[in-house]
Amino acid sequence: MTLDDIENNNNDHGQFMPMYDEGVNFPSYSNNFQPLKIEKNDKEDRQVTCSIVLFVLGFLLLIPWIINVINIKSKNKMARGFSIASVVLFSLSIAIIVIFVIFFIFLITSLHNSHREDR
């Protein structure tokens, strides 16, 4: 096999023979991976859990939504978000209840007055 055959990748066996320069140093890699140390904050985990539970229970009863105001100043964004959503939903629910009560009072009084006039 001649030098021309090697440079043109022509050899008798039909295999590729890579060319290496003797003066080339190939980089060596070392694994310096260190996993992040995640410190669990149990207080924040409890706040998130409490906030989610109160948010879900608020759909059954209104009281848990207003109780969820305890987490409104939480450092955890998720707990704070559920707390704010609970307060907003509580406010909307109270407004809707007040509107319905006023409507039904008006309806009952108007029906009562019309019933009196019929006599």
Image (cartoon, helix red, strand yellow):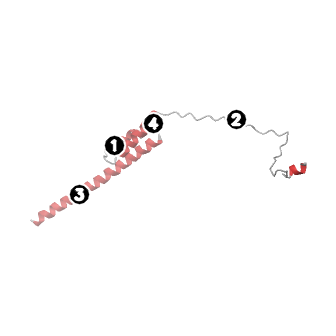
Q: Nearer the viewer, residue 10 or 56?
A: 10
Rendered position, 37 above or below 111: above
Q: Which residue is mark 1?
A: 64
- Residue type at mark 3? Phe
Mark identifier at residue 54: none
Give me the disc on residue 30: 2
Q: Marks 2 and 3: which is nearer the front?
A: 2
Indicate which label's residue lies in the foreground, 4 or 3.
Answer: 4
Q: CA distance from mark 2 to mark 4?
A: 37 Å
- The residues tagged by marks 2 and 1 sit, at their Cα atoms, a distance apart of 55 Å
Q: Is residue 35 left or right of residue 96?
A: right
- Relative placement, left or right, of 111 versus 60 is left
In x, y percent, where is residue 51?
Answer: 40, 41
Circles 2 and 1, Cβ within 8 Å, touching? The answer is: no
**Marks 4 and 1, the one that precedes in the sequence:** 4
The answer to whether the residue labelled 4 contacts the one labelled 1, judged by CB atoms less than 8 Å apart, is no
Q: Which numbered disc, 2 or 4, marks the residue closer to the eye?
A: 2
Mark 1, secondary structure of its residue:
helix
Amino acid residing under circle 2: Ser
Tag 4: amino acid? Glu
Residue 22, image x, y percentages: 85, 40
* Residue corresponding to mark 3: 104
Q: CA distance from mark 4 to mark 3?
A: 44 Å
Label 4 sits on residue = 44
Please identify, in this view, whether the residue under mark 2 or under mark 1 is nearer the observer. 2
Task: Count up the numbered dots.
Answer: 4
Q: In this rendering, is residue 79 above or below 13? A: above
